[in-house]
Image (cartoon, rainbow, N blue to C red):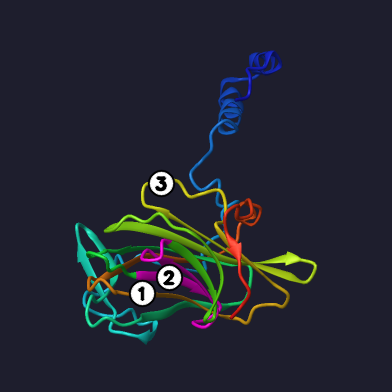
Amino acid sequence: MTAWSPNLYTTLKSMNRVLKLAVLCIWICGLVVLPGARSAETPKPVYENHFESAALDETPADFLVIQGPLMVKAGDGNRWLEVPGTPVDSYGFLFGPTESAGFSVTARIRGTGKGRRFPTFSVGLNGYSGFKLQASPAKGLIELFHGDALVSSAPLKWTSDTWTHLRLQVREAGAGKWKVEGRLWKEGDPEPAEWVVSHELSEEPRAGRASASGSPYSGTPILFDDLVVAPISGANASLKKPSESQDKPAR
């Protein structure tokens, strides 16, 4: 906080009442962070969908459904996009604008295990056959795919029937390289400082839309909410590298 200055006090004594108030207002405003003052630090999303005004039992018109049906449902004062529990299949969709690098996708997803059966769910970038950050509770892994090839994985701690947040980003890393990075955390926990899976590319990724997908192997619905695509902020781009992930060669 800015300390009270004797020079400011002397200056105020020599001013009339109106000027004193003006100077005080300017000084106080310098101590207060006004709402929206951090907007310059946090890039504005190029796409977001929280389903708050989405029509129930319908699929948002801007989605490109790869495998459906996918319907907006509601409960406990919230709305989400729901993958049905049956039939057991791989469901997925594309959303947002077409981008190449320098963007991240985030979502929160809720699935439920049943006995020894568990769902898988993911978010992706650069098209449906691009990059995919997938939670695989049955394996106890968070996995990063490039197309169908598993390129990185790390241990996963997952809680059934709880919202899970996923973040995936693709960025230019310099020297003709690009970096794909992902992490996952439970609702209510702080977002991790480290990327838990990572993969390096030697050529620029092909442009494509963001994606999300899920396979309800447990026979229970998978819920998707708070889909956001945004430019990568400086803070995200400079966070630590994975400490436990293992890069694997493409299959």
Mark 2 vs mark 1: which is more N-terminal? 2
Residue type at mark 3 is Asp
Give the residue number, with chain letter if any, for mark 3: 189
What is the C-alpha distance between the residues marked 3 and 2? Answer: 19 Å
The one nearer the camera, 210 or 86, is 86
Q: Secondary structure at mark 2?
A: strand
Dividing the picture into quadrants, the one containing residue 71 is bottom left
Q: Residues within 10 Å of mark 2 (few under 14, many from 20)?
A: many
Q: Residues within 10 Å of mark 3 (few under 14, many from 20)?
A: few
Give the residue number, with chain letter if any, for mark 2: 122
Residue 120 horizontal/vertical position (percent):
37, 70
Q: Residue furthest left?
A: 75
Residue 56 horizontal/vertical position (percent):
22, 74
CB within 8 Å, label 3 to label 2: no
CB within 8 Å, label 1 to label 3: no
Which numbered tag is attached to residue 214? 1
Residue 241 sits above or below residue 209 on the image: above
Q: Secondary structure at mark 1?
A: strand
